[in-house]
Amino acid sequence: MIPDGELLRRYVDKQSESAFAQLVQRHVDLVYSAALRQVNGDTHLAQDVSQAVFTTLARKAATLCQRANLSGWLYTATHFAAAKAVRTERRRSNHEQKAQAMHELVSTAEAPAEWERIGPLLDGVMHELSASDREAILLRFFENRQLAEVGQKLGVTEDGARKRVDRALEKLRRLLGKRGVSTSAALASVISVSAVQVAPPGLAAALTAASLSGVAATSITIEILEFMAISKVKLAVGTVVVAGLVTPLVIQYQSQCRLREQVLALRQQLDSMGALAAENAQLSNQVVRAATDARLEQAQHAELLRLRGEVGVLRRQAAQRAANPVGRPASDQQKGEEAGQQQPIPKESWAFSGYGSPEAGIQSLFWALHQGDSNAFQAYLQGLSPDLRAKIERDAESRGPNAFAELGVHETGDMAAFQILKKVALSDDKVVLEIQSGAADTPSQMIMMKRFGSDWKLFDQLKN
């Protein structure tokens, strides 16, 4: 963190308004909270006091830039500025209006009971402490810094900082006791939680502009007065001339400051909008990439299933050619198969055969049920019509991750083989298969397969 003195030196040497703005942002909560307590909770008056303090800081910057930390000076300056503002306010307002305002403030306050007794006396008692004790309490409890950082600011070790803070806190406790306010052991916590309040949004920027504007107006006035003194102009005439010259200049400078503030605010809004646009573009790209990856993965899985199906068809064709060489007359068994009946396929021979034909699709479904894992579940879903697939997915979601394995055990647990007894083509894209699963005396099942594109999928299970 850049020390306060270094920021103030940058403002003095380079007229760096950003350095002064950083100082205001760093200490505005401390100044505003102290001012708010000392002006009896009048937020508008507390803002006026804060502006006066930072204006004084800008005017005396050259003499204060040797200080490494400005917390103590700002706290004391706030005390005097608040006292002056309160005296002025008392002369301007009548007692009844102030009493009513205080009544409304107290009636809406929700501070803890101990803070209600300590708060009105805290700033007066703080200025009865020595400068070193006061700064130790400010750093530790008002700014809530760690003891190691307090020691660094005070030029002592962490243990030395702890001892100094404890002594200062004990002195503060005794001073409050002299005023009839008894404090608990949690005095430090009460001060840390309640002493500093967050300044209203935008107050730091407004105070920076107003403070710098006040310094510029004061400088112009001083230069004109010096010129008049050298020229020995009469006081009465000088007053008129000063008023006539300074007022337009001050108004013009304040207008420029307001315009500069508006431009700065617009730039900040544009920067924020640019950052949001970049973030939205990045998120959109991530969504597009994720969707593309998902589609690619689905396409690769579908292609893998298609290739497996083609391999299964080729294997069956090779087995048929091996069983019936060219020129060899077909046996009775083969003639039965040509009529639609196939030999039983034992469970140990089940394999994924794709969905290029109704027979391959049925074997792939039985194989997937028998496997019972997540990869097989995806293969099983590929072999179902859209309506059946949606129903199975809903059932699996409602019954949990083991639903498919349980279904496979139920459907294929006692099966040793399955056999296609008959195949009846209803149309070009619909076929009914009569399937025997299990022993010969087991009732057969009628299953309708329908072609979707190039794949034959399970469409319906018919009643016998």
Image: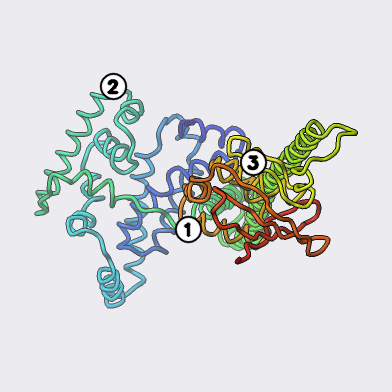
Point out the tag, 3 or 1, that comes first from the N-terminus.
3
Of circles 3 and 2, the one toward us is 3
Mark pair 3, 1: CA separation:
33 Å
Q: Is residue 317 left or right of residue 22?
A: right
Q: Are marks 3 and 2 in contact (CB under 8 Å)?
A: no
Mark pair 1, 2: CA separation:
65 Å
Q: Are marks 3 and 1 in contact (CB under 8 Å)?
A: no
Of circles 1 and 2, the one toward us is 1
Point out the tag, 3 or 2, that comes first from the N-terminus.
2
| Residue ID for mark 3 | 345
Point out the tag, 1 or 2, that comes first from the N-terminus.
2
Residue visible at 21% across and 40% down in the picture = 129
Q: Report whether residue 302 is seen.
A: yes
Q: Quadrant of residue 447?
A: bottom right
How busy is the neighbourhood of tag 3: few (under 14 within 10 Å), some, or many (20 plus)? some
- Disc assigned to residue 364: none
How busy is the neighbourhood of tag 1: few (under 14 within 10 Å), some, or many (20 plus)? few
The C terminus appears in which quarter of the rendering?
bottom right
Q: Position of residue 423 (x, y in %)?
A: 74, 56
Q: Report whether residue 17 is seen.
A: no
Q: 194 and 286: which one is in front? A: 286
Q: Is residue 349 left or right of residue 174?
A: right
| Residue ID for mark 1 | 398
Q: Position of residue 95 (x, y in %)?
A: 27, 74
| Kind of residue at disc 1 | Ser
Of circles 3 and 1, the one toward us is 3
| Residue ID for mark 2 | 157
